[in-house]
Image: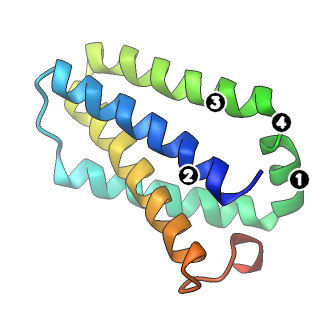
Amino acid sequence: MGTRTDAVLAALALAAFVGLAVLADVSLSPFFLLVGGIATIAFELLATREYDTVRRYWDRRTVQIGSLVAAIGGAAVGTRIAPVVILSLCCGATITYLAVLALVRAGIVPPLRRWW
């Protein structure tokens, strides 16, 4: 597993979030898109402190699929409660994660394990 698998899973999640936004006729909030992006960076900074442990768990197919299902399911439930907030946070977080992966792949940003 690696950045390619992570990118595919993130792209699937983003497609689901965008699909939910279209179905719910939601305009995303720039503020909550930004908050979702900041949350992703904060999570990645924390996760890289224990990179090997996180990667060992994340490389399990059941964890990956379970996380994808939980994210999409959570977004679907959240869409019924607070669609603008939830979908904006989800899209902002996922777009930021995909951007980080692209920057790492391009060699502009060091691999996550070297962030600390």
Q: Which mark is residue 76?
A: none
Q: Residue at x 10, y 24 (%)?
A: 25
The mark nearer the N terminus, 4 or 2, is 2
Residue 78: % across, % down: 35, 20
Residue drawn at x 65%, y 48% is 5
Q: Name the residue carrying label 1.
A: 53
User: Please, is residue 32 above or below residue 114 in the view?
Assistant: above
The number of discs equals: 4
Q: Work out whether mark 1 precedes mark 3 in sequence or the reverse, and give the earlier one.
A: 1
Q: How far is the residue under mark 4 from the one under mark 3?
A: 11 Å
Q: Quadrant of the C terminus?
A: bottom right
Disc 3 crowd rating (10 Å Cα; few below 14, some 14-19, many 20+) is some
Tell me the element at label 2: helix
Q: Which residue is mark 4?
A: 60
Q: Residue 65 versus residue 52: which sits nearer the camera?
A: 65
Work out whether 77 lies above or below 113.
Answer: above
Report helix, strand or loop for mark 1.
helix
Whole-number angstrom distance, CA of label 3 to CA of label 2: 14 Å
- Residue 93 in picture, x, y percent from top left: 42, 50
Mark 3 or 2: the one toward you:
2
Residue that carries the numbered disc 3 in the rendered image: 67
**Residue at the disc numbered 2:** 7
- Figure check: 53 above or below 84: below
Question: Which is more N-terminal, label 1 or label 4?
Answer: 1
- Please tell me whether mark 4 sits on a helix, a strand or a loop: loop
Q: Is residue 52 visible?
A: yes
